[in-house]
């Protein structure tokens, strides 16, 4: 994806465009993007930094680029890269307006969704960040921080979407939906009060799925829950610093299925130290839990992670666990 971004930077510059980048990799490796022709990189959250940058570029602001928090750019006069101080996270997410769907050709979007998938889905995000410590997960934007919109605010957006665009489905793109205690339960109540129930899919940790939560998800209209199961071997989960148990995965799948909610498993293979016996435990878990869908990836070290640092140093959990099986 980085190479694809480099190609798009070149194409944009050939057309005389100002190129502004934002995202996880651009935050971690802004210097590489600037070297390949990008004009500015937004570090971390981009909303407020982008607004100030656009005002500066359009002449509505004259405080200078050096005063814009969260901005990295090439200083042509000094032939060097300038990295300004990171901007604090937005903690009051309810203060943000709903997405500007009016800038999208929603009818064309809807037509293509129904043509390709047979239904029309729109996406929402209710949180930012994840407080857990999986050592293969890169977190250059929020680190371990986690901020959440209120269930009232999210339910209001669903009501707005339902009344204005009538989606058949919502995809919640959060790392974890409803981490705060009683968030999902309150959310389900509000959706019914507002007549705003829309079928949706979301992501949850296995150890956060309780009887109460599964029941509330079903009441809220949840169609599918994806779980970061990763492995059926406790040894591998511990090596990943997942912080949950294999039995949590079994219980979560049971509770969700019991409430007629589809279950998806994200699985990883090839984590350092994984043996053939560990692989068999994962296959056994899949056979016994019977998820409705699975997503499989090979473990790979992302820059900025504990996993990457261990591999970069030529050592890692494979040494502790006896090498690759």
Image (cartoon, helix red, strand yellow):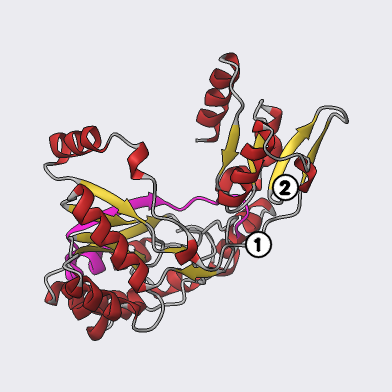
Provide residue 248's location: percent of width, then percent of height: 32, 79
Q: Is residue 265 visible?
A: no
Q: Which residue appears at 64% of the width and 39% of the height?
A: 55
Q: Earlier in the sequence, mark 1 or mark 2?
A: 2
Q: Tell me the CA gap for discs 1 and 2.
A: 12 Å
Of 216 and 273, nearer the camera is 216
Residue drawn 46% across and 71% down? 242
Point 59% across, 63% down: residue: 143
Reading the image, the residue beneath label 1 is 88
Closest to the camera, between mark 1 and mark 2, is 2
Q: Are marks 1 and 2 in contact (CB under 8 Å)?
A: no
Is residue 300 covered in magenta?
yes
Q: Is residue 187 left or right of residue 65?
A: left
Q: To which residue does mark 2 refer?
A: 68
> In the image shown, does 54 or 264 lie closer to the viewer?
54
Quadrant housing residue 265: bottom left
Q: Residue at x 38, y 58 (%)?
A: 125
The picture places residue 217, in percent across and down from the top left corner, at: 22, 73
Foreground residue among 35 and 164: 164
Q: Does the stretch in magenta take in 289?
A: yes
Q: Which of 105 and 259 lies nearest the eye of the viewer?
A: 105
Measured from the top left, where is residue 37 in percent x and y?
A: 66, 25
Q: Secondary structure at mark 1?
A: loop
- Please indicate whether residue 315 sits to the left or right of residue 199 in the image: right
Indicate the position of residue 268 as horizontal and vertical percent values.
39, 57
Picture disc at residue 99: none
How many C-alpha atoms fall within 10 Å of the one at disc 2: few (<14), some, or many (≥20)? many
Mark 2 secondary-structure assignment? loop
Give the answer, above or below, for where 109 lies relative to 171: above
Q: Which residues are magenta?
A: 283-305
């Amino acid at each position: 994806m980085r190479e694809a971004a480099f190609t798009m930077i070149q194409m944009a510059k050939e057309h005389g465009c100002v190129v502004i980048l934002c995202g996880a990799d651009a935050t971690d490796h802004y210097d590489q993007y600037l070297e390949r022709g990008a004009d500015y990189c937004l570090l971390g959250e981009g909303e407020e930094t982008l607004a100030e940058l656009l005002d500066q570029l359009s002449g509505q602001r004259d405080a200078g680029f050096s005063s814009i928090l969260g901005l990295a750019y090439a200083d042509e006069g000094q032939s060097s890269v300038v990295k300004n101080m990171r901007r604090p996270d937005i903690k009051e997410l309810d203060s943000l307006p709903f997405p500007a769907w009016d800038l999208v050709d929603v009818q064309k979007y809807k037509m293509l969704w129904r043509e390709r998938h047979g239904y029309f889905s729109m996406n929402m995000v209710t949180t930012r960040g994840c407080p857990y410590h999986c050592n293969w997960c890169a977190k250059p934007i929020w680190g371990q921080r986690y901020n959440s919109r209120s269930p009232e605010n999210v339910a209001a957006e669903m009501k707005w979407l339902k009344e204005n665009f009538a989606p058949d489905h919502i995809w919640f793109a959060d790392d974890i939906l409803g981490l705060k205690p009683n968030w999902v339960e309150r959310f389900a109540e509000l959706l019914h009060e507002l007549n705003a129930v829309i079928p949706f899919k979301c992501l949850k940790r296995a150890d956060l799925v309780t009887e109460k939560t599964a029941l509330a998800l079903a009441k809220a209209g949840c169609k599918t829950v994806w779980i970061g199961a990763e492995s059926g071997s406790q040894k591998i989960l511990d090596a990943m610093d997942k912080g949950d148990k294999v039995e949590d995965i079994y219980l979560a799948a049971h509770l969700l299925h019991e409430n007629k909610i589809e279950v998806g498993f994200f699985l990883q293979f090839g984590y350092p130290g994984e043996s053939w016996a560990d692989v068999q435990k994962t296959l056994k878990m899949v056979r016994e839990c019977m998820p409705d869908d699975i997503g499989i990836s090979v473990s790979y070290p992302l820059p900025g992670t504990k996993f990457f640092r261990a591999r970069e140093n030529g050592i890692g959990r494979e040494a502790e666990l006896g090498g690759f099986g």
